Amino acid sequence: QVHLAEFGGGSVQNGGSLRLSCVASGYTPGEDFCMGWYREAPGKLREGVALLGSDGDASYLESVQGRFTVSEDSTKHTLFLQMNNLSPEDTATYYCAALPPPCLLAHEADPTVVRSVLEANYGYWGHGTRVTVSS
């Protein structure tokens, strides 16, 4: 079974930067997944933040576009999220996910869609890494 583990969360000041990583293991040869980052703020539903398509193209939540960059090292089965110019609105637990194709675009991964995915136990999810941004 696929396992995902997130690293790199922490507490930073407004305007600071963090780099998250997600290490995947347990892949079966030939399996293909749509990798991406999602976040869940306190009292809110989980939403898509930065998602990779089947060809490696990235899509972003509007509020993070221009500040966040998602990348991957496929040889190491690792996904990254570079987060710059962080604001308190970015405070959340960030999750790495591996979902079966077809791959979602960020604007399609709204909270209601993600909730349905979670309730259906669809795909694989890490346990999350907490990011706190203070003003």
Image: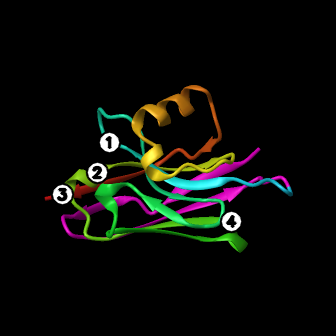
Q: Residue furthest right?
A: 29
**Rendered position, 37 above or below 74:** above
Taken as a whole, is the magenta stretch helix, strand or loop? strand
Which residue is nearer to you in this view: 122 or 102? 102
Residue under label 1, please give it: 41
Residue under label 2, please give it: 91
User: Residue 57: which numbered mark, if any?
Assistant: none
User: Magenta segment: does it hold 20?
Assistant: yes
Q: Residues within 10 Å of mark 1 (few under 14, many from 20)?
A: some
- Looking at marks 2 and 4 on the same chain, the residue that comes earlier in the sequence is marked by 4
Residue at 66%, 60% (x, y): give it: 54
User: Residue 134: which numbered mark, if any?
Assistant: 3
**Rendered position, 47 above or below 105:** above
Q: Position of residue 111 (x, y in %)?
A: 40, 36
Mark pair 1, 2: CA separation? 6 Å
- Looking at marks 1 and 2 on the same chain, the residue that comes earlier in the sequence is marked by 1
- Looking at marks 1 and 4 on the same chain, the residue that comes earlier in the sequence is marked by 1
Mark 2 vs 3: CB contact within 8 A: no
Q: Secondary structure at mark 1?
A: loop
Q: Position of residue 4 (x, y in %)?
A: 62, 51
Q: Nearer the viewer, mark 1 or mark 3?
A: 1
Residue under label 4, please give it: 77
